[in-house]
C-alpha cells in the first residue's frame, strides 16, 4: 500500500532526499551588499552538504533556516 511516489512537480521525491539543496549539498543564492548583488553559495545542513569542505559557510550560519524553508515552500 505504501508503494507510491509523491509528485512534487520539478523534483522527484523518490530520488531527492533533501528538498533544500536537491542533494547537491550546495545552495546558491544572491547576497546584496552596498547595493550590489553577489552570487555566492553555502553548504546545506543535510549529510551531503556536511560532507563538503568545511571552509564553505553553512547555510544555517548565513540564514535563519526556518525562514528559508518557509521561503522555499512559497
Ligand atoms: Zn541538502
Image (cartoon, grey):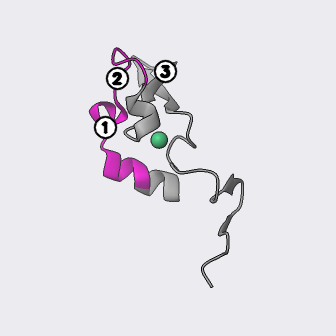
Question: CB of residue at label 2: within 8 Å of ligand 1?
Answer: no
The part of the chain drawn in magenta is 52-69
Q: Which sits earlier in the primary sequence, circle 2 or circle 3?
A: 3
Dot 1, crowdedness within 10 Å: few (<14), some or many (≥20)? some
Which residue is denoted by mark 1 in the rendering?
60
Q: Is residue 30 magenta?
A: no
Question: CB of residue at label 1: within 8 Å of ligand 1?
Answer: no
Q: Nearer the viewer, residue 50 or 55?
A: 50
Residue 37 appears left or right of 8: left
**SS at mark 3 in the image:** strand
The answer to the question of whether label 2 and label 1 lie on touching residues, with beta carbons closer than 8 A, is no
Q: State the separation of the CA atoms marked 2 and 3.
A: 10 Å
Q: Nearer the viewer, residue 67 or 57?
A: 57
Q: Which mark is residue 8?
A: none
Q: State the separation of the CA atoms marked 1 and 3.
A: 14 Å
Q: Nearer the viewer, residue 66 or 26?
A: 26
Front tag of 2 and 3: 2
Numbered label tally: 3
Q: Nearer the viewer, residue 43 or 61?
A: 43
**SS at mark 1 in the image:** helix
Residue 22 appears left or right of 12: left
Residue 39 appears left or right of 58: right
State whether residue 35 is above or below residue 3: above
> Where, quadrant-wise, is the N terminus in this rendering?
bottom right
Residue displayed at 67% across by 53% down: 11
Question: CB of residue at label 3: within 8 Å of ligand 1?
Answer: no
**SS at mark 2 in the image:** loop
Which residue is denoted by mark 3 in the rendering?
40
Q: Which mark is residue 57?
A: 2
Amino acid at each position: 500500500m505504501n508503494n507510491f511516489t509523491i509528485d512534487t512537480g520539478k523534483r522527484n521525491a523518490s530520488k531527492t532526499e533533501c528538498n533544500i539543496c536537491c542533494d547537491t549539498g550546495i545552495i546558491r543564492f544572491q547576497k546584496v551588499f552596498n547595493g550590489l548583488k553577489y552570487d555566492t553559495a553555502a553548504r546545506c545542513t543535510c549529510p551531503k552538504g556536511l560532507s563538503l569542505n568545511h571552509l564553505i559557510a553553512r547555510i544555517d550560519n548565513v540564514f535563519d533556516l526556518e525562514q528559508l524553508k518557509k521561503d522555499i515552500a512559497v
